[in-house]
Amino acid sequence: MNHPLPIIHGITEHDAGPYRMERLDLEFSNGERRLYERLHGRGHGAVAVVPMLDDDTVLLVREYAAGVHRYELGLVKGRMDAGETPEQAANRELMEEAGYGACELTVLRSLTLAPTYMSHQTHLVLARGLYPQRLPGDEPEALDVVPWKLADLGELILQEDFSEGRSIAALFIVREWLKQHATG
C-alpha cells in the first residue's frame, strides 16, 4: 500500500552537538498531526569499505570502539571530506586504516543507521585490485588488519567482537553481489 508523504507544516532546528536536531510538524493523509524529530550529521557523508584481498578474502580491521569500550572487528569506515566522492573517500580510508589502495572501487549502495530519526547514510564501497599503500590517518594506534574468508561469514557474525550492523550488512551484500557478478 502506497501512502502519500506527510505534509510538512513547519521545521524548527536546534544544535545537538555533532548533529543538527530538527522538529517537523507533520500532517498525515488521514488528517493526524504529529511532531517528529530527526538528526542530521554535520559532515559530508561516510563510507564503509569492503576490501577484497582476493576473490574470497575480505580485509577487516580491529580498532578500539569507545561506545562499547572494547576492541571491535569491522570494516574500514570513515567520514567523507568536503569535495570527495565516495570512491575517493573509500580509497583514502583504506590507505589510512589498512595500508592498502585499490585499483577498482565500486559503490554498491547506501546504508542507513536509523532512518526513522536519522538522515545519516553510509556509502558501501567494494574495493578490489588491492596494492600496498599507506597514508597517515587519525587513529591513535595502528589497526590490526585481519583477513577473513567470505565462506566463513557465518562464523564471523557469531563472534562477540564483530557486532557493528553496517559491517554485518555490508558483508552479506557484497557476498551476494559477488555471486551475481561472478565471471566464468
Image (cartoon, helix red, strand yellow):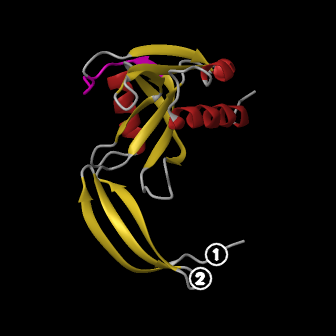
Residue neighbourhood size for the residue with mark 1, other residues' Cα within 10 Å, grouped as few (<14), some (14–19), many (≥20): few
Say whether residue 98 is left or right of residue 58: left
- Please state the horizontal and vertical placement of residue 181, each as a whole percent of the image: 69, 35
Q: Quadrant of the N terminus?
A: bottom right
The magenta stretch spans residue 153? no
* Residue nearest the viewer, comparing 15 with 149: 15
Q: Which mark is residue 100?
A: none
Amino acid of disc 2: Ser
- C-alpha distance separating marks 2 and 1: 8 Å
Q: Which residue is mark 1?
A: 3
Say whether residue 153 is left or right of residue 61: right
Q: Which residue is mark 2?
A: 29
* Residue nearest the viewer, comparing 157 with 44: 157
* Residue nearest the viewer, comparing 43 with 106: 43
Which secondary structure type mostly characterizes the magenta part of the structure? loop
The magenta stretch spans residue 134? yes
Mark 2: secondary structure: loop
The answer to the question of whether label 2 and label 1 lie on touching residues, with beta carbons closer than 8 A, is yes
- Please state the horizontal and vertical placement of residue 157, each as a whole percent of the image: 61, 25
- Please state the horizontal and vertical placement of residue 49, each as a whole percent of the image: 47, 32
Which residues are the magenta region? Answer: 130-139
Amino acid of disc 1: His
Q: Quadrant of the C terminus?
A: top right
Q: What residue sits 42% from the left and 57% below the top? A: 119
* Residue nearest the viewer, comparing 160 with 104: 160
Q: What residue sits 54% from the left and 23% below the top? A: 52
